[in-house]
Image (cartoon, rainbow, N blue to C red):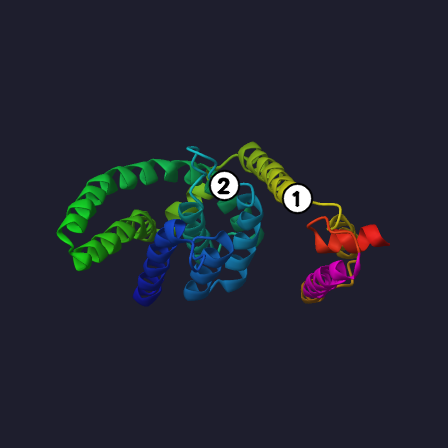
Amino acid sequence: MSVLSIILIIIVAFFAGMEGILDEFQFHQPLIACTLIGLVSGHLEAGILLGGSLQMIALGWANIGAAVAPDAALASVASAIILVKALGAQSISVKDAVSSSIAVAIPLAVAGLFLTMIVRTLAVPIVHMMDSAAEEGNMGKIERLHIMAVCMQGIRIAIPAAALLFIPAETVQHFLESMPAWLTEGMAIGGGMVVAVGYAMVINMMATKEVWPFFAMGFVIAAISDITLMGLGALGVAFALIYINLSKMGGSSNSGGGSNTGDPLGDILNDY
């Protein structure tokens, strides 16, 4: 791996760590982080495959109250680096490398919580320093302290990423090959169950009587193997536009004497 690729991967890791807190450009999402690392390392297709698989698992990860979700940023970056290292040895197939990387990603995501606790504990004095700066009216100092605290989150991912990058590819390959089949297959099955839980959580939050028909149509159309992902994406956009237009029609029809339940599309369905 070239020096330029190593530098770019560390930069991606740094931004992924910051985005785990900011949620601005979603660099910490597996699909984005793994794809970028695959791009800068010359393994774009494998990075997309790994990112897509991890993204399905991460759908079920969310912070609920004081419970912190597994660290998607560390899982994405570290597993992508392991994938690149394994493929660099050129003695393992892409499919096996992706499967092994997914199996490693789950424990890494849980281990990332420990690093998160350390960084957030170190950030507590920074908050007190911000309070003092606010009392002084020093806005510039407050901004600098904000940037420092966010950069700490980036360093939290960049340092482990740099450490992994300097591990020889042969060592990573031997590690992946030494993993027993029951472990990799068990982690793959567990990851699939987490995907199902993630979908269930999303559907539970979104599902109403108005959108269930769209869910049903989506699942039926997705089962047609002749439709490509681009075609499914276009149909999804079309369904979203239909829903928006129906909502606008429902809002305008309420003035004509129709029922007004607070849900414009529901009013249309009730009038029918």
Residue kind at label 1, given as amino acid type: Ile
Q: Is residue 181 left or right of residue 105?
A: right
Residue at label 2? 62
Report the magenta residues as a range: 235-257
Q: How many marks?
A: 2
- Where residue 163 appears, as percent x and y from the top left, is 30, 49
In the rendered image, is residue 208 in sight?
Answer: yes
Residue plotted at (32% across, 58% down): 10
Q: Quadrant of the N terminus?
A: bottom left
Above-or-below relation of 61 to 139: above
Residue plotted at (38% across, 53% down): 22
- How crowded pointer 2 is (Cα within 10 Å; few <14, some 14-19, many 20+) is rated as some
Residue plotted at (24% across, 42% down): 123
Q: Nearer the viewer, residue 160 or 199?
A: 199
Residue 96 disc label: none
Asked which secondary structure carries label 2, the reply is loop
Q: Nearer the viewer, residue 32 or 140?
A: 140
Q: Nearer the viewer, residue 189 or 93?
A: 189
Q: Quadrant of the C terminus?
A: bottom right
Residue kind at label 2, given as amino acid type: Ala
Asked which secondary structure carries label 1, the reply is helix
Q: Is residue 116 left or right of residue 215?
A: left
Residue 263 belongs to the span the image colors magenta: no
Q: Nearer the viewer, residue 50 or 23?
A: 23
Residue 248 belongs to the span the image colors magenta: yes
Distance from the alpha carbon under mark 1 to that under mark 2: 14 Å
- Tag 1 and tag 2, C-beta contact below 8 Å: no
Residue at label 1? 203
Q: Is residue 45 left or right of residue 139?
A: right
In the rendered image, is residue 223 in sight?
Answer: no
Residue situated furthest right in the rendering = 272
- How crowded pointer 1 is (Cα within 10 Å; few <14, some 14-19, many 20+) is rated as some
